[in-house]
Image (spheres, rainbow, N blue to C red):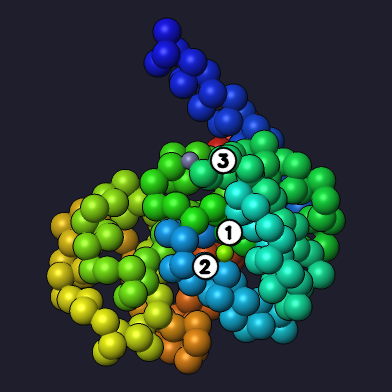
Amino acid sequence: MKVEVVQNVLKLNDEVAAINRKRLRDAGVFTIDVMGAPGCGKTALIEATLQLLSNDLRVGVLVGDLATQRDADRLARYSDHVVQINTGKGCHLEAHHILQGLSRINIDRLDVLLIENVGNLICPVGFDLGQDLKVGMFCTTGGDDKAAKHPYIVCESHLLLLGKMDLLQYVPFDLNLFRTDIRRLNPDVNVIELSSATGAGMDTWIRWIHDQRNQRLKRPLDTKGEVVS
Ligand code: MG
Ligand code: ZN
């Protein structure tokens, strides 16, 4: 019985995600779901990204947190299209949160939508939001064991980021071990090592967004709203 309930919840989530995906596709919006632990630097990354992308592309943000509007206040300095989603006791975003968020921004005015998921390395991975791609973020101050301990996010992400590279020299973080763990779990995934504080590696991340957007928007959707690969 319990399993059946969980399956129904996920099935409903997937149906709403397909609605989101179709809406975003119809509006020509390329959407990225950024996932990572609390404090790994997701909001700082998006702040820097907004500044670097805003000359070329119109970027909106849906930002999820259990409580407060603090991240939206930070991000609103760089975009007029920012919506905070408070999940209360919810430890991840679900497709219906995004559906509600989309009703509060004009997606026809956007080229890119960044979703900052609730700080959590575990369940955000399992919930389709209607995004084009999922990005998993780690950081040097979070410890070099986090990839090995969270194989699901390593395997399911289209791209991995290692943030706070400017702090690498101050913390006990074995970069080779981290890289080896990722290669073992997901040999094909791209990893960008960057720092939103110094800007190191940010050019690679920005280029990745441009390239992926150009590729993805050319690909058709099937009747369920899924990308035909
Ligand atoms: Mg944040
Ligand atoms: Zn959760």
Q: 133 or 1: which is nearer to us?
A: 1
Q: Is residue 195 left or right of residue 181?
A: right
Task: Identify the secondary structure beneath mark 1.
Answer: strand
Task: Identify the secondary structure beneath mark 3.
Answer: loop
Choose the circle earlier in sequence order: 2 or 1: 2
Q: Is residue 188 left or right of residue 61?
A: left
> Mark 2 or 3, which is nearer the eye?
3
| Label at residue 90 | 3
Q: 23 or 103: which is nearer to us?
A: 103
Q: Which residue occupies 68% across, 58% down?
A: 68
For ligand 1, tell me if the residue under mark 2 lies within 8 Å: yes
Q: At which x and y percent is residue 213? A: 58, 64
Q: 141 or 54: which is nearer to us?
A: 141
| Label at residue 116 | 1
Mark 3 neighbour class, 10 Å CA radius: few under 14, some 14 to 19, many 20 or more: few
Q: Do callouts 2 and 1 mark residues in contact (Cβ within 8 Å)?
A: yes
Q: Is residue 58 left or right of residue 197?
A: right
Q: 218 or 35: which is nearer to us?
A: 35
Image-quadrant location for residue 84: bottom right
Choose the circle earlier in sequence order: 1 or 3: 3
Q: Do callouts 1 and 3 mark residues in contact (Cβ within 8 Å)?
A: no
| Label at residue 42 | 2
Residue 90 in view (yes/no):
yes
Q: Which amino acid type corresponds to the residue marked 1 in the rendered image?
A: Glu
Residue 4, placed above or below residue 51 = above
Residue 89, placed above or below residue 193 = above
| Label at residue 171 | none
Q: What separation in Å lies between label 1 and label 3 (alpha carbons)?
A: 14 Å
Q: Which amino acid type corresponds to the residue marked 3 in the rendered image?
A: Gly
> Mark 1 or 3, which is nearer the eye?
3
Q: What separation in Å lies between label 2 and label 3 (alpha carbons)?
A: 18 Å
Q: At which x and y percent is residue 225? A: 61, 36
